[in-house]
Amino acid sequence: MKIFLILSLFAMGLNAFSQNECDEANSYFVIAYSHVKEAYDSNNISHLKYFADRSLKSFKLAKKAMGNCNCVKALILANKSIDLLAKVDTAETYEDGRFFVKRARDISRECVIEIDKCSVASTTLISETNKSSTLSDLEKEQLKLRQQQDALKRKEAELKAKLAEQQEKSLLLKKKELIHSYEIAISSTIKTYNETLHICSCNHDTLKAEVATEDELETQSLEAIKSYFNQTIKGLASNYMAELNSCSAN
């Protein structure tokens, strides 16, 4: 009978923990703050806009997840952050975009603090409703367990945000390596084509390739980058053959 009572109280504690309406929103707010910090640390407008957009989407998801989480201050701050981040996409210069990102970053930090307070308050309210006027030793341990679970859940959200950041950085590094490899290959190809046309004594225009900037290319997917450079290489080959055929005809 005593074992059954212990298990029942423990199950009630876990159920109360799972019903904290602010937990899911808390996780999204942490991720949104992480992205806006990444935007602020960006050194070009493309990356700044990319991470600002990621933060904006996370804030919108956080608002949807709030449900019955009665956290007015966090909601007000989230709306302010959303308004600022929405302006980044139309910013014409890096400085203009970073101005909005800086303000959003500072407000986002306060938003995370407020939603965290609400999460703790929500859990405390649940425990206060369920406990009797004098807590038994078992109930005290149960409350302690819920508090530890809250801390672990917030930590898990932080770790997920860091993992997302690492994955973004890893993808960006792969893009940079791919772009540099193609640039080297194209430069070598152009040199070879021009030397060949010179040897053939062709009165030709020097072959060149107009390539997009690295910042522009990094906003594309790996497959899009490959496709872009492959088309550039095909265009070079076509121009080379046209010059060579023209030379042979003369």
Image (cartoon, rainbow, N blue to C red):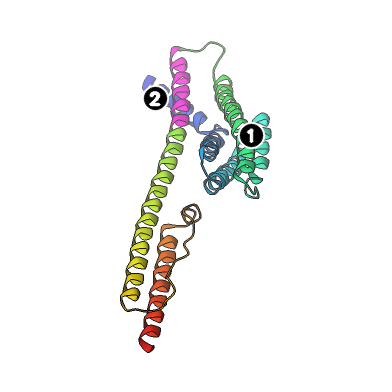
- Asked whether, in this view, residue 91 is left or right of residue 43, the answer is right
Observer able to see residue 67 = no
**Amino acid type of the residue tagged 2 in the rendering:** Phe
Q: Which residue is mark 2?
A: 4
Viewer-proximal residue among 142 and 117: 117
Q: Position of residue 57 (x, y in %)?
A: 58, 46
Write the start and end of the magenta stretch as one range: 137-155
Which residue is at a point 58% across and 26% down the rendered structure image? Answer: 113
Tell me the CA gap for discs 2 and 1. Answer: 54 Å
- Please tell me whether mark 2 or mark 1 is closer to you in this view: 1
Q: Is residue 114 above or below residue 64?
A: above
**SS at circle 2:** helix
Question: In x, y percent, where is residue 51?
Answer: 53, 44
The earlier-in-sequence mark between 2 and 1 is 2
Residue designated by label 1 = 103
In magenta segment, residue 125: no
Question: In the image, 99: left or right of 180?
Answer: right
Q: Which mark is residue 90?
A: none
- Locate residue 180, reporting x and y percent: 37, 55
The residue nearer to you, when weighing 198 against 143, is: 198
